[in-house]
Image (spheres, rainbow, N blue to C red):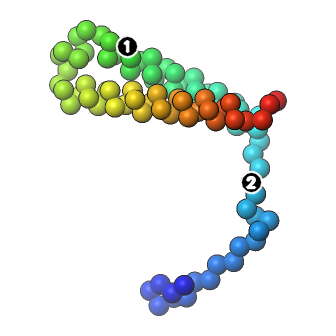
Amino acid sequence: YVAGGVQYEWQFDEGDNERTIDVTAERERLKKEIARLEELVASGERKLNDSDFPTKAPAKIVEGARKQLAENKLLLEKARAALAALPPE
């Protein structure tokens, strides 16, 4: 294709499309990520369940904490699913 007066050409080698991963390393990475996310979720839940935080903090801060907790829960769910999808050891 042409962009900015320069012609670009792409060539793809079909053999380069396959990726391999080190399953053991990926398993360890996911386990660490899961542990980190579990801590973040627990911390967020403690903060939001604290009777003082939601009543004393500005509404914008509380809403941000709720959104962050929801995001961390989603990331935790995805990391657990990715770990479960790895081939057995």
- Which residue shows up at 17% across the image and 16% down it? 56
Q: Residues within 10 Å of mark 1 (few under 14, many from 20)?
A: few
Q: Which mark is residue 8?
A: none
Establish if 10 lies above or below 37.
Answer: below
Under mark 1, the amino acid is Arg
- Residue 79 in picture, x, y percent from top left: 58, 33
- Which residue shows up at 47% across the image and 90% down it? 5
Of residue 80 and residue 60, the one placed in the foreground of this image is 80
Establish if 5 lies above or below 75.
Answer: below
In the visual, does 48 lie left or right of 79?
Answer: left
- Which residue shows up at 62% across the image and 83% down it? 9
Mark 2 and mark 1 lie on one chain; the one further toward the N terminus is 2
Q: CA distance from mark 2 to mark 1?
A: 41 Å
Under mark 2, the amino acid is Arg
State the SS at label 1. Answer: helix
Q: Is residue 29 visible?
A: no
- Residue 65 in picture, x, y percent from top left: 32, 27
Q: Residues within 10 Å of mark 2 (few under 14, many from 20)?
A: few
- Which residue shows up at 57% across the image and 23% down it? 35
The quadrant where residue 47 appears: top left
**Is the N terminus in the top left, top right, bottom left or bottom right quadrant?**
bottom right
In the visual, does 43 lie left or right of 27?
Answer: left
**Is the C terminus in the top left, top right, bottom left or bottom right quadrant?**
top right
The quadrant where residue 30 appears: top right
Q: Which mark is residue 19?
A: 2
Q: Which residue is mark 1?
A: 46
